[in-house]
Amino acid sequence: MKFFKPQMKQLIKENKELQVRLKELMNEHQLEKNFALKALYHSEVAEGGKYQLAYQALDQPKG
């Protein structure tokens, strides 16, 4: 599975827990938003993470 910034942003927009986690990562590690997005992707989405299925569903065509 590959990181796609628009999908990750959409996933975060739809999930309060991820919004909080993103802000924590940015503050805790003094990361720019793009780096925090990638870190969040690797910790919560990639390799069977908690949000993997929700992330993959964003890639599916609507209809």
Image: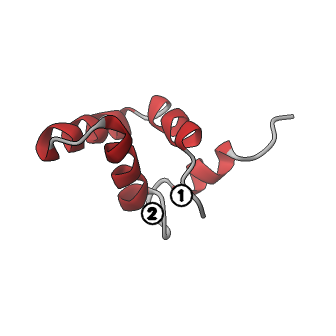
- Residue at the far bottom in the pictured view: 47
SS under mark 1: helix
Q: Residue at (50%, 31%) from the top-left corner?
A: 14
27 sits to left or right of 12: left
Q: Residue at x 87, y 34 (%)?
A: 63
Judge left or right: residue 58 versus residue 8.
right
Tell me the quadrant of the picture where the N terminus can be found: bottom right
Label 2: state its secondary structure. Answer: loop
Q: How many marks?
A: 2
Which residue extends farthest right?
63
Outermost residue on the left side: it is 28
Q: Amino acid at mark 1?
A: Gln
Q: Position of residue 53 (x, y in %)?
A: 59, 56
Residue 51 shown left or right of residue 21 in the figure:
right
Q: Amino acid at mark 2?
A: Gly
Measured as percent of width and height from the top left, residue 24 is found at 20, 40
Identify the mark at residue 43; answer none if there is no mark: none
Name the residue carrying label 1. 52
Quarter location, residue 58: top right
The answer for how far apart the CA atoms under marks 1 and 2 are is 5 Å
Quadrant housing residue 33: top left
On residue 49, which mark appears? 2
Foreground of the two, 40 or 53: 40
Query: What is the x, y in percent for residue 36?
Result: 31, 45
Question: x, y (%) of residue 47?
Answer: 49, 70
Could you tell me if the residues under marks 1 and 2 are in contact, i.e. CB atoms within 8 Å?
A: yes
